[in-house]
């Protein structure tokens, strides 16, 4: 019998197009999986940011993986009513961010929005002696920091 856990496991091969060391599952983008009686699969994704240009690519890759696994029909929808937040990133996803050279966001309370963008750990040397250089990185979800110990500039995945 096919379960939601089985589908999530299949979808671990679908990587974030901007961060290929992290799966959509570990990024927390795969929000809901329905298994209708007709043998198909319906997957609901939530964007990390409403203007994320990679969402259509992600949806297509999810559909292709499930069709290749023999599921039909397969539908993928974007749910923009649910707000994604960085606490949805799994521990495996946080390791993948580091592997990609990004500082993972700190955990925070999404109800209070209490977080410090200035707090970042250097993905190169592990130092917490870092400074925020620019809250606007190359994408909406990243900020630019510099490490005071190794002097490397790096990006942090923003806590949101």
Image (tube, rainbow, N blue to C red):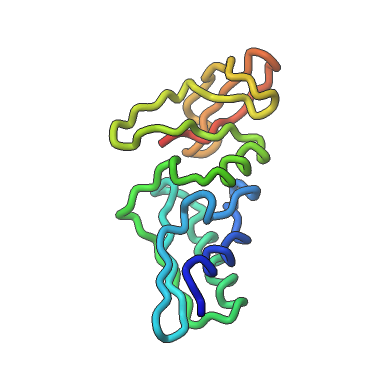
Residue 107 location (% of width, % of height): 45, 33
Residue 5 location (% of width, % of height): 51, 65
Q: Quadrant of the C terminus?
A: top left
- Number of numbered callouts drawn: 0
Residue at left offset 44%, top offset 46% = 88
Left or right: where does residue 153 sit relative to residue 87?
Answer: right
Left or right: where does residue 58 sit relative to residue 123?
Answer: left
Q: Where 100 falls versus 7 (above or below)?
A: above
Residue at left offset 58%, top offset 19% = 128
Q: Where 28 falls versus 148 (above or below)?
A: below
Which residue, as the protein is rendered here, is positioned at the far bottom? 38
Nearer to us in this view, 130 or 87: 87
Residue at left offset 56%, top offset 73% = 66
Nearer to us in this view, 127 or 80: 127
Residue 13 location (% of width, % of height): 63, 61
Nearer to us in this view, 106 or 45: 106
Residue at left offset 52%, top offset 35% = 157
Which residue, as the protein is rendered here, is positioned at the far front? 1
Q: Where 98 falls versus 77 (above or below)?
A: above
Residue 44 location (% of width, % of height): 41, 64
């Amino acid at each position: 019998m096919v379960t939601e856990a089985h589908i999530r496991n299949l979808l671990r091969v679908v990587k974030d197009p901007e961060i290929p060391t992290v799966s959509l599952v570990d990024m927390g983008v795969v929000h809901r999986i329905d298994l209708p009686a007709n043998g198909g699969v319906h997957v609901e994704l939530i964007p990390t940011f409403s203007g994320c240009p990679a969402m259509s690519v992600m949806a297509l890759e999810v559909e292709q993986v499930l069709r290749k696994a023999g599921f039909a029909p397969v539908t993928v929808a974007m749910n923009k009513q649910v707000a994604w937040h960085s606490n949805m990133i799994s521990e495996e996803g946080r390791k993948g961010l580091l592997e990609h050279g990004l500082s993972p966001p700190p955990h925070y309370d999404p109800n209070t929005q209490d977080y410090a963008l200035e707090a970042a750990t250097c993905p190169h040397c592990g130092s917490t002696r870092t400074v925020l250089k620019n809250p606007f990185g190359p994408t909406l979800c990243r900020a630019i920091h510099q490490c005071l110990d190794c002097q490397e500039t790096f990006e942090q995945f923003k806590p949101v």
